[in-house]
Image (cartoon, helix red, strand yellow):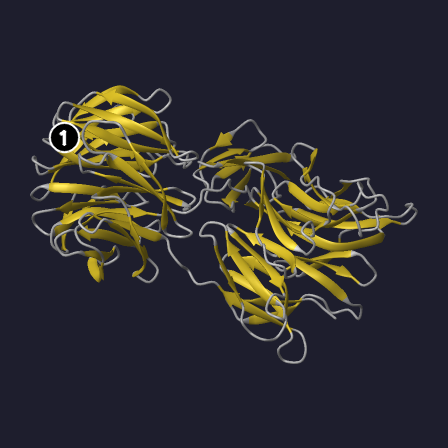
């Protein structure tokens, strides 16, 4: 029995082992494959150098895992009194460390600097038949944490980012549970009486094997969409693993065990359309441009905001007689709350903070404007503040959540609001009757559509000044920026067109769409733009590569706003490579970021008192020596640091 690897890009199969012994339990990261040999040692094969290396000292070593430059396994050494502990080997230092001393630690998994395992130290017999708990060890802090504390058995943990998953028998059968390190919250994933075993996790997706259909199928649960799916072949499928949108498993459908792979369909993100005259919200799957649900809401829905975790959508009304907002549960596509607000004038404009904890809406009328702050945990209005203007129209939040920007249509300016105090800290004069507003993904620039001036104001957020005024079509209304910050899209209610502004040159291109285009949004990948045509009762879908309408999606009456689900923000996992890693000084080293979780900022420390904030920097070492490299990556969800030495 040997270890084989299949390269999906070249469609070639490679045998990494050629000796006569048996090899088991492979794991792979980047160009390195690890496994256990039948003499119970851990070996590694480097695909880039075709070199095989024995990792552990002589003894008994089982079930290896690898992440970055670190390999973990369970085992004991000759002369030990028995039992099993968790060991880790650092490829950069060639150093092996023992993480536990309980003698009852098994099944390790590693992600970044975090190692998780099952441990029976709290069981009277320590025989893997009683109280097994999940533990975690942080290599960067040398801190051990007990994750589960109940008296049932937890086994087979896996980890990705801040989430740990495992199988658990506390309910009289095996279920899948997950624990979020960032919130200290445990969640039960499976609730049926079948047996659910051996979970794996990548991003928002958890996979496991489950016998609820009379044979073992592979199940997948998406934490973001709350949707469960599974294989349907009548054979048995076992021991899944997941990476990206690929799931692999072993399968006996041919009378022997083979390896199969499945590719997950890419549903979403979803666009949420408020249909003002139908009192509904249309839900569009942007992967297929199909309406998947129509949700009845309050009278006259206008603004819409989607929480980053995609679990809730907030809808408000512009009708001055209603003063209400509704909350939609995306798992059921039903309204779970409708909240009346005591305020003069209608409730309009909707924007959500990057962490999903607050939604900002606007109130008031010609007599004065107000900003409303809604706590998404409780769905209650926590603050209503008067702001400097009249007839507030639209609201936007910057990427770090520190500032909110409001267009004051009656007073021709933009309010800048500090979210820590909800006070106006600056007002920026713009064109006549500003309406739509959008912030670039890096937070450096604001774009404002001035309806009566036929212009778009470009505001520098560092100075709160207008740096450019772009002349556009008649009566620009709403505005959206693509994720790269290279294109701005503007709707024109009366001319049935959308303009595309090249932010480098301010050159304007015009695209015909439906009748009376209103709301507009760009998909997270920047490949599509969705335009609500309130006079045509449909949504125009623009291909951003060609600037052409590729589809028109029928929705309700008078669609006026588009909210886009942007995906779940996760704490990134720092990872990088360096080339070369040795040589004569002066040595020029190229560093390549390989972090997961979509970081938005990078901070490198090169070990010689110099730093960089570039994503993929190049650094010159002028003196010979051994240097410890540190990379810290961040996004709105948090930060992660990885240290690794080079020479």
Can residue 535 be spotted in the picture? yes
Give percent across and percent down for residue 306: 35, 43
- Most extreme residue toward the bottom is 255
Q: Residue at 45% x, 44% y: name it.
A: 598
Give percent across and percent down for residue 28: 63, 57
For the residue labelled by badge 1, is the local secondary structure a helix, a strand or a loop? loop
Locate residue 161: give its quadrant: top right
Give percent across and percent down for residue 602: 47, 36
Locate residue 621: give its quadrant: top right
Q: Residue at 52% x, 43% y: name it.
A: 591
For the N terminus, which image quadrant?
bottom right
Q: Residue at 35% x, 49% y: name it.
A: 524
Q: Which residue is mark 1?
A: 409
**Badge 1: residue crowd in 10 Å (few <14, some 14–19, many ≥20):** many
Side of 584 where 307 appears, left or right: left
Instruction: State the residue in front, 595 or 338.
Output: 338
210 shown above or below 163: below
Q: Residue at 25% x, 50% y: name it.
A: 280
């Amino acid at each position: 029995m040997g270890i084989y690897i299949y390269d999906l890009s070249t469609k070639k199969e490679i045998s990494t082992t050629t000796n006569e012994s048996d090899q088991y339990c492979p794991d792979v990261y980047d160009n390195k494959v690890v496994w256990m040999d039948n003499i119970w040692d851990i070996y590694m094969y480097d695909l880039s150098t075709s070199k095989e290396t024995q990792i552990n000292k002589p003894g008994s070593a089982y079930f290896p895992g690898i992440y970055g430059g670190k390999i973990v396994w369970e085992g004991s050494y000759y002369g030990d009194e028995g039992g099993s502990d968790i060991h880790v080997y650092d490829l950069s230092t060639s150093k092996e460390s023992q993480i536990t001393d309980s003698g009852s630690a098994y099944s390790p998994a590693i992600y970044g600097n975090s190692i998780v395992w099952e441990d029976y130290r709290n069981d009277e017999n320590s025989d893997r038949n009683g109280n097994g708990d999940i533990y975690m060890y942080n290599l960067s802090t040398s801190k051990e944490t007990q994750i589960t504390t109940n008296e049932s058995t937890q086994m087979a943990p896996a980890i990705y980012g801040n989430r740990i998953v495992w199988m658990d028998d506390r309910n009289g059968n095996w279920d899948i549970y997950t624990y979020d390190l960032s919130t200290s919250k445990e969640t039960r994933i499976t609730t049926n009486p079948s047996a659910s075993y051996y979970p794996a996790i990548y991003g928002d997706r958890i996979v496991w094997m489950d016998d609820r259909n009379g044979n073992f199928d592979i199940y997948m649960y998406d934490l973001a969409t709350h949707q469960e799916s599974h294989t349907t072949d009548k054979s048995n499928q076992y021991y899944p693993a997941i990476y990206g949108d690929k799931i692999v498993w072993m399968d006996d459908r041919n009378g022997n065990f083979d390896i199969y792979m499945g590719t997950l369909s890419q549903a979403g993100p979803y666009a949420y359309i408020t249909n003002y005259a139908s009192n509904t919200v249309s839900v569009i799957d942007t992967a297929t441009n199909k309406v998947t649900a129509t949700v009845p809401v309050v009278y006259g829905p206008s603004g819409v905001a989607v929480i980053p975790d995609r679990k809730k959508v907030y809808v408000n009304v512009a009708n001055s007689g209603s003063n209400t907002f509704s909350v939609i549960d995306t798992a059921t596509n039903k309204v779970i709350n409708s909240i009346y607000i005591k305020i003069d004038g209608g409730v309009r404009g909707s924007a959500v903070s990057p962490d999903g904890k607050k939604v900002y809406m606007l109130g008031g009328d010609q007599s004065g404007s107000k900003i409303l702050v809604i706590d998404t945990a409780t769905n209650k209005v926590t603050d209503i503040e008067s702001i400097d203007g009249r007839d507030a129209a639209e609201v936007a939040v910057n990427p770090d959540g520190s500032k909110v920007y409001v267009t004051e249509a009656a007073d021709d300016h933009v309010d800048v609001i500090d979210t820590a105090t909800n006070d106006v800290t600056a007002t920026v004069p713009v064109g006549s009757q500003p309406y739509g507003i959008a912030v670039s993904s890096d937070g450096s620039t604001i774009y404002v559509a001035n309806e009566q001036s036929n212009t778009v104001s470009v505001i520098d957020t560092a100075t709160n000044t207008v740096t450019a005024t772009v002349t556009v079509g008649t009566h620009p209304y709403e505005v959206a920026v693509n994720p790269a910050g290279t294109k701005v899209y503007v709707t024109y209610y009366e001319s049935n067109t959308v303009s595309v502004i090249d932010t480098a040159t301010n050159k304007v291109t015009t695209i015909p769409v439906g009748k009376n285009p209103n709301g507009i949004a760009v998909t997270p990948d920047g490949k599509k733009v969705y335009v609500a045509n309130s006079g045509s009762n449909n949504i125009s879908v623009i291909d951003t590569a060609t600037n052409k309408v590729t589809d028109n999606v029928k929705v309700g009456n008078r669609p006026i706003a588009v909210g886009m689900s942007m995906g779940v923000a996760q704490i990134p996992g720092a990872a990088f490579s360096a080339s070369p890693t040795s040589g004569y000084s002066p040595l020029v080293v190229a560093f390549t970021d390989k972090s997961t979780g979509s970081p938005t900022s990078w901070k490198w420390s090169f070990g010689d008192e110099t730093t960089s904030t570039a994503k993929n920097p190049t650094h010159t070492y002028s003196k010979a020596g051994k240097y410890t490299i540190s990379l810290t990556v961040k996004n709105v969800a948090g930060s992660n640091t990885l240290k690794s030495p080079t020479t």
